[in-house]
Image (cartoon, rainbow, N blue to C red):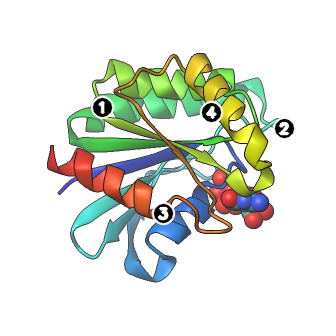
Amino acid sequence: QPQFAFAGRSNVGKSSVINRLVGRKNLCYVGNTPGKTNQINYFQIDGKAYLVDLPGYGYAKVSKTERERWGKLMDNYFQDDQGLISLGVLIVDIRHKPTADDITMHNWFRETGCPEIIVANKLDKLKKSQIELALELITNTLELTDEDRLIPFSAEKGIGKEDLIKAITYVHEN
Ligand code: GDP
């Protein structure tokens, strides 16, 4: 079964995006990796695919040790489950330049050859006139090409949901 892995920095709205996309009631919890703050949660969507909820990163209060633990966990995850991840969904905040951790995460997907969709969340917080520049900043910082999929999204308003579903379906079928 395909695995869709969702990643993003803490508070970027990862849970909200997942909720908007599938709804908690359609997710069946199937387990987690050991650990408290850094655990990876697995859900099953309609018995058809796995949704992998990767731990949020880059929280300001997090210590160096915590950061290193996160890095190790991700290393292990990508080593063990690499072949299984069908798609990475990287969630960033449309208002901000992607962080060093975002870039690390993005490179993890890229270097493992994992197809990736980038979701620029919290679109509703920008004025229309600011959107183009914001997307350009994300594109340049993550060094995205025409082949990369960058989807403006608002988990709060539900904007971009159809585009994201289409992109996931497309990647999944190709
Ligand atoms: P997580 O830590 O990445 O799982 O983030 P959450 O889903 O818990 O969201 C963090 C905060 O951002 C919450 O207060 C959400 O209500 C808010 N939030 C999430 N998505 C959006 C969005 O698209 N627009 C706005 N305005 N707020 C959002």
Q: CA distance from mark 4 to mark 3?
A: 17 Å
- Disc 4 residue type (three-letter): Leu
Q: Which-is-in-front pick, marks 2 and 1?
A: 1
Residue at the extreme bottom: 25
First of labels 4, 3 by sequence position: 4
**Amino acid found under the numbered disc labelled 3:** Lys
Is the N terminus in the top left, top right, bottom left or bottom right quadrant? bottom left
148 up-or-down from 26: above or below:
above
Which residue corresponds to mark 2? 61
Q: Is 61 placed left or right of 156 in the picture?
A: right
What is the C-alpha distance between the residues marked 1 and 4?
22 Å
Of circles 3 and 2, the one toward us is 3
Secondary structure under badge 3?
Answer: helix
**Quadrant for ligand 1?**
bottom right
Q: In whole angstroms, how far apart are the C-alphas of marks 2 and 4? A: 28 Å
Q: Mark 2 or mark 1, which has the lower sequence index?
A: 2
Q: Which mark is residue 161?
A: 3
Quadrant of residue 45 in the image? bottom left
